[in-house]
Image: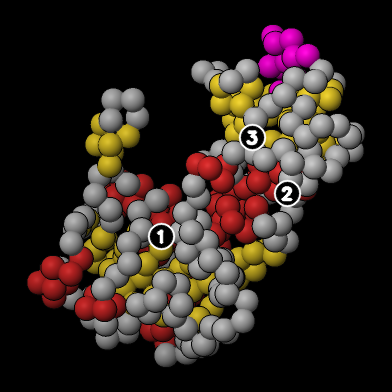
Amino acid sequence: MRVLFMGTPDIAAECLKALVDAGIDVVGVFTQPDRPKGRGMKLTPSPVKVFATERGIPVYQPTKLKKCGDLLAEIDPELIAVAAYGRLLPKSILDYPKHGSINMHASLLPRWRGAAPIQRCIAAGDTLGGVTTMYMAEELDAGDMILRAETPITDADTGGSLHDRYAEMGGKLLVETIRQIEAGTAPRTLQPSEGITLAPPITKEECAVDWTRPSREIFDLIRAMNPFPTAYTKYDGAPMKLYASKVGSRLGEPGCVISTDGGLEVACGDGSIVITELAAAGGKRMAADAWLRGHKVEIGTKLG
C-alpha cells in the first residue's frame, strides 16, 4: 500500500520511523516549511524532514494545501497517515486516497481533542492516558476511531516523559492500524458525544504559576510544562522557570517562601510546593538546592 505520511515534530518523526522500520511503503512526506530557530534565527528543518531526507524519502513542504491537487495526483497515495502535522487538511486531500486518511492522536479520544493533549492531560491530573488512531474528518480530531492504546499517568510523569512514551506507542499503533486497513479488518467506532474535552495550544499566561491555587494543581502544572513550554514564576522581578517540584504541607501566605531546606518551599492556596529544579533568569537548569547555595533567599520573600 502506497502511504503518504504527514507530520512535523519529534513525535511525528518517531511515528514515521516506525512505519519505515516496519516496511510500510512510504512514498512521500508532507511536513511544515523550515522555520527560523535559535539566536541566529537560522532556517531549521522539521524532525520529520530530517529523518525522511536521511532515509531518501521524497519531502514536500507545501504552503497552500488546497493547491496540492496536481502534486497529490503525482504521488498517488492509497492511504494518508498523519501525526502532528500542524494544519487542518482540506476535504480534497482527506478524500483523495482510496483507503482514506488516518491520524495518530496523542490522547484517548474524545478526551483532549486539539494541539496540546499531552500537557493538558497532565495539568488536569489525569491518571490514564494513551493514543488513538482514527479516520480523519473535517472537524478537528472528531473522526471515527480505529485503535487505542492506554497507559497509566503517574506523578513521576512530565510532559517530556509522556511525549516520549506516546511517540513509541503511537508509532506501533499506526503500524498496526495500517496493517489492519490492508487486511480489511480495521474497526471503525464513532466517537461518543459525551466526554469531549479540548486541548488548545498552551499560552504563556497559562504557564505562570498562580500561588493562590491548590498545591496539587501547581504540582501538576509544573510537571505538565516540563520541559516545554515550562511553568514559571517571578523572583526579584525576573522570570524563574520551574521544572520539578513536590507537594509540601506547610502553611503560609500564598507566593511567600516559607523554607529553603531541601528546595525552595513556597506557600500555596492550601499547603505548599517545594521547588526542586529551576532555572533563574539568565541561568541554566539546575537543582534548587544547588541554586540556593549561591543565592540567599529570605523567608517571606514573595514570588510571582
For numbered disc 1, what is the local secondary structure?
loop
Amino acid carrying label 1: it is Ala
Of tags 1 and 3, the one toward the viewer is 3
Q: In the rendered view of the protein, which quadrant contains the N terminus? A: bottom left
Q: Residue at x 59, y 56 (%)?
A: 120
In this rendering, the answer to whether 56 lies above or below 176 is above
Identify the secondary structure beneath mark 2.
helix
Give the Cα separation between the discs numbered 1 and 3.
Answer: 25 Å
Residue picked out by circle 1: 84
- Earlier-in-chain disc, 1 versus 3: 1
Percent position of residue 206, x then y: 56, 46
Residue at x 44%, y 80% (from the top left corner) = 143
Report the front residue among 102 and 224: 224
Q: Which residues are magenta?
A: 288-298
Residue at x 32%, y 82% (from the top left corner): 100
Q: What is the number of the mark on residue 217?
A: 2
* Dot 2 amino acid type: Glu
Percent position (x, y) of residue 44? 28, 38
Mark 2, Cα crowd under 10 Å, few <14 / some 14-19 / many 20+, is some
Q: Quadrant of the C terminus?
A: top right
Q: Earlier in the sequence, mark 2 or mark 1?
A: 1
Cα separation between marks 3 and 2: 14 Å
Which residue position holds label 3?
243
